[in-house]
Structures are given as C-alpha cells and as structure tokens.
Amino acid sequence: MSATRQASVRAFNGLVTQGWNRAAGLYNTSILQRLAYRPPQDEIIAQLAVSGAKRIADVGCGTGILASRIAADLTPEAIYGCDASAGMLKQARFRSDRVQWRNRQAEDLGFPDDAVDAVVSTHAFHFFDHQAALAEFHRILAPGGLLAIVLNNPTSRFARVLQPAPIQGLAYFPPPNEMRTLIEAAGFTVTEQRPVQRHPIPPALVPDVLTVARRD
C-alpha cells in the first residue's frame, strides 16, 4: 500500500471510528439488533459450534453483543472482542466481563502468530482495508483455523459502479465472487458461501452473505 493510501485509510478509519463512537447507543436498540444483526450472529455461532474453536476473535465487535453471546453459549477458553471504536467498547464492557475487549483496528490486532482458532466478523468488513485485514487474520489464526465473515455482498454486476467511487477503496462491499477471490488470495480455502437466512425476509431485501473459510 502506498504512503498516500495508508494516510487516506487512517483518516477514513478515524472518521468511521468517530461516527460509531456517537452511534453506539443507537446500535444497541433491540429492534435494530433483532432485525439486522441477530440472524447473522446466529449463523456465526452455529459455525463456531461445529468448528469446536476454543480461542475466538470477534473483529469489529461493536457493542459486544455477538462476543458476549459466544462467551455465554459456547464457553470458549478465550473470546476477544476487537473494535477500533472506544465508544462501542465502552458499551461492550458493561455487557460481559468474560470477554477480553481490545481497542484495535482489524489490520493490526496485536495478537501473536497463530493465537486464535477462529476469527469472525459481522457487518464490519466493508470498513476494513480488505487485503491488510485478511493478512492479519491469516497471521493470527492457527493452521486450519476458521474464518467466518458476514457482509452485505450485492450480487449485481454493477455493484462496484453503484458504490461511491471516491471511497470504493476505503469502504467497499465486494460482490460474493470478489469476496471469495480476496479471501483465497490471502491464503484461505473457502468452504461455504451463501445468503444469511432471514425467514420470512427474502435475501434480495437484505443481501448479506456468510463466507466461511479455513486457513491453509
């Protein structure tokens, strides 16, 4: 990444973080969580349960709802909630003392190599530097470790054109095939990719996709 792009990413990440610091309270509202976030969180927990992962990092954890559910439902050896927003983590710390909360960006999580068995992320990946974040996920995952990401992945061939050109490299929702290519290029094998189940809401109305992979 060029120095200019690095500076742009840092500036944009700062704006995103400030925005989520202010929006932390709204994010916690029950109707928003039930309609928007609980279905993908259910999908992630199901994947983790099957995988048997004992050390789990939830990246872009927000106010910690998913990380807290993982701690309560799966009782892993270690669960980390990582977010760049101090405002989000302030809310998260009231939610659970079983989660180890970390104020870190996805591109620099601060773990040793091979530190976790699973990295999960729901509706946050579009804010990350995709290649840098995936490289970091690969670094901290043990061999064979689980990667599970939920993101709005529009299937239209015009997806890139329809997103604002000035920020495509900074906040971008890749289509499913592009998402798969990014993950595979980072050293993962994609094992599953499908729409999040939101019965009775059809996938066309909320185009979020679960992508599951294993570290090679």
Image: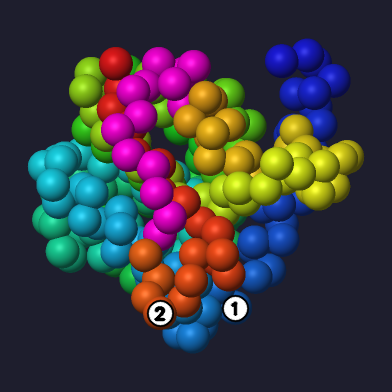
Q: Residue at x 22, y 33 (%)?
A: 117
Single out the mark in the foreground, 2 or 1: 2
Q: Position of residue 168 (x, y in %)?
A: 78, 38
Q: Residue at x 40, y 71 (%)?
A: 198
Left/right placement of residue 198 relative to residue 22 reads left
Q: Is residue 186 magenta?
A: yes
**Label 1 Cα neighbours within 10 Å, binned few <14 / some 14-19 / many ≥20:** few
Judging depth in this view, the residue of 131 and 201 nearest the camera is 201
Q: Mark 2 falls on what kind of element?
A: loop
- Disc 2: which residue: 200
Left/right placement of residue 96 relative to residue 133 reads left
**Label 2 Cα neighbours within 10 Å, binned few <14 / some 14-19 / many ≥20:** few
Q: Please, which residue is most extreme toward the front here?
A: 157
Circle number at residue 26: 1
Residue 102: in sight, yes or no? no
Left/right placement of residue 66 relative to residue 19 reads left
Q: Mark 1 falls on what kind of element?
A: helix
Residue 11: in sight, yes or no? yes
Q: Amino acid at mark 1?
A: Leu
Question: With respect to residue 160, does 43 lie above or below?
Answer: below
Q: Quadrant of residue 77?
A: top left
Question: With respect to residue 70, does 137 lie above or below?
Answer: above
Q: Position of residue 107 (x, y in %)?
A: 55, 30
**Figure colour scheme:** rainbow
Q: Amino acid at mark 2?
A: Pro
Instruction: Report how far apart the C-alphas of labels 2 and 1 lie in the structure.
Output: 25 Å
Judging depth in this view, the residue of 196 and 88 nearest the camera is 196
Q: Quadrant of the C terminus?
A: top left
